[in-house]
Image (cartoon, helix red, strand yellow):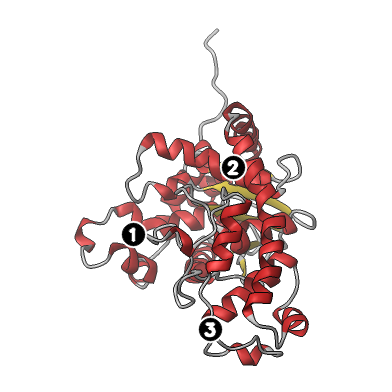
Amino acid sequence: MAAFKELVFSGVQPTGNLHLGNYLGAIKRFVEMQARSECLYCVVDLHAITLWQNPAELKSQIREVTAAFLAAGIDPKRSIVFNQSQVHQHAELAWVLNCVARLGWLNRMTQFKDKAGKDRENASVGLYDYPVLMAADILAYRATHVPVGEDQKQHLELTRDIAQKFNNDFAESIAAHGHGEGFFPITEPLIGGPAARVMSLRDGTKKMSKSDPSDNSRINLTDDADAIAQKVRKAKTDPDALPSEVAGLAGRPEADNLVGIFAALKGATREAVLAEFGGAQFSAFKGALVELAVESLAPLGAEMKRLVADPAQIDAVLADGAERAAALAAPTLDAVKDIVGFVRRGPTLRAV
């Protein structure tokens, strides 16, 4: 297999109401990764329309996610920040990969079953094919690493399967075009962190979600300091004191969730948090969590609001990012066209 330059790719859907789970599970990690790797961070608007979106709201939400990236500390000069629909290579490569992926592989994707529910016949083809487009997002840049949540792990495994099958199916052509023994990398998922899965503040057994009818179940990234403090203080707990060791969190989902949130915001481990607060009552722990959450999140929300009020600045970042992303993706797609046997358009010759 050829050696590949380390490159990180990840994306966030522009579906509105970004919350603490999005920040800790993805965006905060993106900021940390840009310090040590070349990174592309994409607002995946093509994925968003696999479920119907109000067009005006979608445009606003694309800008809101971009604002969250920038407010959190992603540097658009160091990293590439763009929205998917501005880079046509994603969709083009997805078609080629559709012809590599197998129907049986997609039939095993549990997220489609969950999102389509009992009315699968009325689900869009795009929702079914979502994982192949995700593979194209990653492989258009021949990305080596992708930070994802646990719920996307199966899709990353599909990306690896598609890459391997493409490399095998076209091995002779890949070698003939000077790409060694493999054209696409077998991308590594980066799963983990103290808050890889942030749960509801009202029910520690359910994932924090924008669709929960209770606004108190989540901390929105646009919440002000008062709202953040109120939601933390109202968060569900149990009557026992915090344990001194992580094993003591077993069977205590709300305690485990709040400890994980504290650890992720502070950049510490659960063990370190419990070493400090083990034996404390939740009233004392929540006071410390309020202070940390407000300090970490209130400035982010304020900066998001400032950026959203200046859409021209956001659009300029996206346009620049799309241009830089396309410059990376275009050679990949051109090589894929050569490998599979397409005749590519050359320079236009003018008649004399």
Secondary structure at numbered mark 1? helix
Q: Quadrant of the C terminus?
A: top right
Q: Gap in Å between the C-alphas at discs 2 and 1?
A: 26 Å
Indicate which disc, 3 or 1, sits on the residue closer to the N terminus.
1
Q: Is residue 341 left or right of residue 108?
A: right
Q: Secondary structure at mark 3?
A: loop
Please name the residue that numbered disc 1 is placed on: 128
The answer to whether residue 146 shows anywhere in this view is: yes
Work out how far the residue at label 2 is from the one at label 3, CA to CA, in angstroms.
Answer: 37 Å
Residue 56 lies in quadrant = top left
Question: What residue is shown with label 3?
Answer: 238
Looking at marks 2 and 3 on the same chain, the residue that comes earlier in the sequence is marked by 2
Identify which amino acid the numbered label 1 is placed on: Tyr
Q: Is residue 194 visible in the rendered structure shown here? A: no
Amino acid bearing label 3: Asp
Mark 2 or mark 1: name the one nearer the start of the chain. 2
The residue at 66%/88% (across/down) is: 246
**In contact (CB < 8 Å): disc 2 and disc 3:** no
The residue lying at 40 percent from left, 57 percent from top is 130
Which residue, given by chain and number where applicable, does mark 2 sit on? 66
